[in-house]
Image (spheres, rainbow, N blue to C red):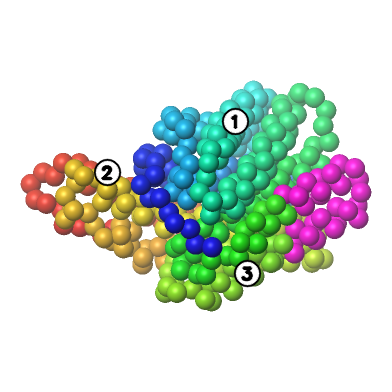
Amino acid sequence: MQRSLTYTAMPPIQVPLPFLLAAPCFALAAALLLAWQGETALASRWSPVTLAMTHLLTLGFLTMTIVGALFQLLPVVAGVGIPLARPVAALSWSALALGTVLLAGALGLGLGPAAYQAAAGVLGLAGFVILAAVGTAISHKIVPAARPLVRGVRLASAGLAVTIGLGASLALYLSGMGPLDAPLLTDIHASWGLVGWVVALTATVSFQVIPMFQGTPAYPRSLESWLPAALVALVAGWSAAALAGVGPLRLAAEAGVALLLLRYAGATLLFFRKRKRAADVGTYYWVLAMGSLALAALVHFLPLGADQRPLLSGILVIAGFGMSAVNGMLYKIVPFLVWYHLQSDPSLPRERVPALKNILDGGRALRQWRWHVVALGLLAAAPFAPAVLARPAGLFQALALLLLIRDLGGAAGLYLSLRRPPSGTVVQGHAL
């Protein structure tokens, strides 16, 4: 169901943009870590370097972008704003960024117990501020048509709360505080973080942004309503079965999640065949994301090694689905934010505002997508030949992310340059 959008309710650009610009820098750090460590980073899912890379991507890239997108989307789509948006965004951004650096340093560099404790505290603060801000916003009266979006946000926020709680417990355990069944809780933590938070919320957001930016038919209201709820319910059932040691129920929940992911990916790919607009880099990224998600679901049923299956599943969900979907949204959202806030500025002459298509060159975006595809292919194959493919995968991914940083930074730089008072000649437009 298509919704009317309230663009006048947009927060200041300073609210979402720092999240969207910082996120690729954390992913670049993960790629450089892979290029530096090579085989060690993909030898096992329990490698400290692997865990550091995982959290740089899930916290620094995916969660950073998701939070920025939520602060932007909720006022526009649901008609509810984040209270005290600018100071809340600044505090959320600072705590999430610092906590991610501390945790990655503790995991990957062995910074010691104090770093784990500090990371648990700072990331706990970030989670509290984000969840309180989003929860306060969606507790108000919302636009009726946005109820499925808000329901999905509520469910995914619950997933984030569980993820943070388990993550903080594991960080304190690693600092030497208290006994835990760390492998079991790590599995549960990863399941809630990837499925209950990243996939559930990305799917919820995609129900809005894919029809909006790609011109596809609207998703059926039934799919919008039950998919996030079913994912969260299955993860909860899987967690209970894992804690209780009930193997058959655990396997059934895993199979249920896999089938749901296949259903969502298949429906989205079908809608792309019915789109009304020409394909662009956003289309290619979403198709890549859905193909990766479907492959991740199928990997569950393949006879792979004990380390290969979780590594490959994680790569396909985090880098294939999450990073691809986020990259596609960044190439749409950042230029739109720059263009909208420029043309809404009454002090800026209209002739100085470039057309939306000139904010960020489509050819550059397409080249970045190609490098990302190559990197993803190498990364997906790396668990089977880490000594040969790990470093090339890291280098290609680093190159793709440098291009993304250049493109998004160029759009932000254009915004700043046009907001300055003109000196001498009038700028007619600017194409990056």
Q: Judge from the rendering whether residue 233 lies leftward or rightward of residue 281; answer left or right.
A: right
Rendered view: 132 above or below 160: above
Q: Name the residue under label 2.
A: 416
Q: Residue at x 72, y 49 (%)?
A: 232
Q: Mark 3 points at which residue?
A: 267
Dot 1 or dot 2: first in sequence order is 1
Q: Classify 10 Å Cα crowding around label 2: few (below 14), some (14-19), many (20 and above).
A: few
Closer to the camera in the image, 106 or 177? 177
Amino acid on which disc 2 is placed: Leu
x and y, in percent, of residue 144 in the image: 54, 51
Q: Quadrant of residue 226?
A: bottom right
Residue 66 appears in the picture as rendered: yes
**Looking at the figure, which quarter contains the C terminus?**
bottom left
From which residue to which does the magenta span run? Answer: 232-259
x and y, in percent, of residue 269 in the image: 58, 71
Q: Residue at x 46, y 39 (%)?
A: 81
Q: Classify 10 Å Cα crowding around label 1: few (below 14), some (14-19), many (20 and above).
A: some
Amino acid on which disc 1 is placed: Phe
Q: Mark 1 points at which residue?
A: 128
x and y, in percent, of residue 294 in the image: 67, 66
Residue 369 appears in the picture as rendered: no
* Residue found farthest to the left: 424
Secondary structure that dominates the magenta span: helix
Nearest-to-viewer mark from 3 and 2: 3
**Looking at the figure, which quarter contains the N terminus?**
bottom right
370 part of magenta stretch: no
Dot 3 or dot 1: first in sequence order is 1
Cα–Cα gap, marks 3 and 1:
34 Å
